[in-house]
Amino acid sequence: MDAQSAGRAARSLELLHSLSYFVPEVGERLAEVGLEPGRMGYVAGRAAPMGAVNAGVVTAAFFNFSPDAVAAVIPRAWDLAAPHVIVEARYRAVGEAYVRLLGESVIASPEMAEAADLLSTAARGIPGVEGRPLYAGYAALEWPSAPHLSFWHALTVLREYRGDGHTAALQTAGLSGLEALITHTATGRGFQKKFALTRRGWSEDQWNAACDSLRDRELLDARGELTADGSDLRNLIEDLTDDIALTPWAALGEDGVARVVELATPWRDTVVAAGVFPAGVFGPKVRTAS
């Protein structure tokens, strides 16, 4: 199993994890346990497996969020709902969303159980928690018994493991969190600028200042597009991310990876067709379906 093939597999499945940030069930269940609507649900919901940590820890782990945006909801969220309560509500909501989007027949199918087993094999092949704070939080949770929740949990563990490594790669490349967000947007594969600003809590002035810094380093051109050096740097970051995320996928093996992608691709396409991800969120080069 080579790193680039493993990276393609991870990216092809990621929407089945990230739907949790867009489906209404998650916001509704988190509101029921006391969280405020909006950014608090995302930040507290994703960070809760790490426990009642302070805003600095969450900012460090999330990397490309505005510190002010995180501090506006953390640690206040922990006063509204304990982290373990948030975790339980979020998992319950994801389960409900999977049932609604994929249907009871898919949820109860042998294919879902097989996919959950395969992804669990990969996730359990992760060698350790060193330098991986978000992964460590999720790895410490009790493994769900329902196959569709086991599938999502394994996918989330793998995604956060990869994400922690991606942060290390971005730092190795000398990019700040905001610079990482800008350069990813410039690839056409990340968020659109408006969504990135809103979702991550940065101001237009902060964005423009970071763009100026990237131009000074000759990573962006006058139009805000990546230069040749900028494209090379982003490619290097992605290659390094693939390299340091390979171990769990290698544990599953080429046949296992191919099989789980085969099983899950129709589910991903169903989620995309259902309009879970609003228009204008992702850049023009993102392929959300085969």
Image (tube, rainbow, N blue to C red):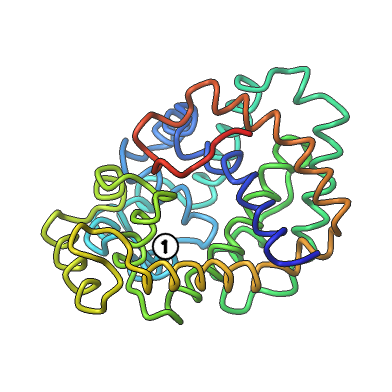
Q: Going by the image, does 6 lie left or right of 217?
A: right
- For label 1, the residue is 62
Depicted 240 relative to depicted 162: above or below: below
Residue 77 in percent (x, y) is at 35, 50
The correct choice, above or below, for 67 with respect to 130 in the image is above
What amino acid is labelled 1 in the image? Phe
Corner quadrant of residue 178:
bottom left
**x and y percentages locating residue 1 in the rendered image:** 81, 64
Q: How crowded is mark 1: few (under 14 residues within 10 Å), some or many (20 or more)?
A: many
Q: Is residue 136 left or right of residue 176?
A: right
Q: How many marks?
A: 1
Q: Which of 115 and 250 is in front in this view?
A: 250
**Can you tell which quarter of the image residue 194 is in?**
top left
Where is residue 276 shown, x and y percent of the image? 48, 27
Residue name at image x 74 percent, y 50 percent? 143
With respect to residue 59, does 154 lie above or below? Answer: above
Relative side of 18 to 194, left or right: right
Q: What quarter of the picture does the C terminus occupy?
A: top right
Taking depth in this image into account, of 214 and 114 the one nearest to the observer is 214
Q: Is mark 1 on a helix, strand or loop?
A: helix
- In this rendered view, identify the residue nearer to me: 124 or 212: 212
Q: In this view, does 91 lie above or below 97?
A: below
Residue positioned most to the left = 205
Furthest residue in direction front, as rendered: 228
The percent position of residue 180, horizontal first and vertical second, equals: 36, 66
Q: Residue sitting at 58 percent across and 27 percent down?
A: 271
**Residue positioned 84% across, 25% down in the render:** 109
Residue 179: quadrant of the picture: bottom left
Rendered residue at 84%/46% (across/down): 117
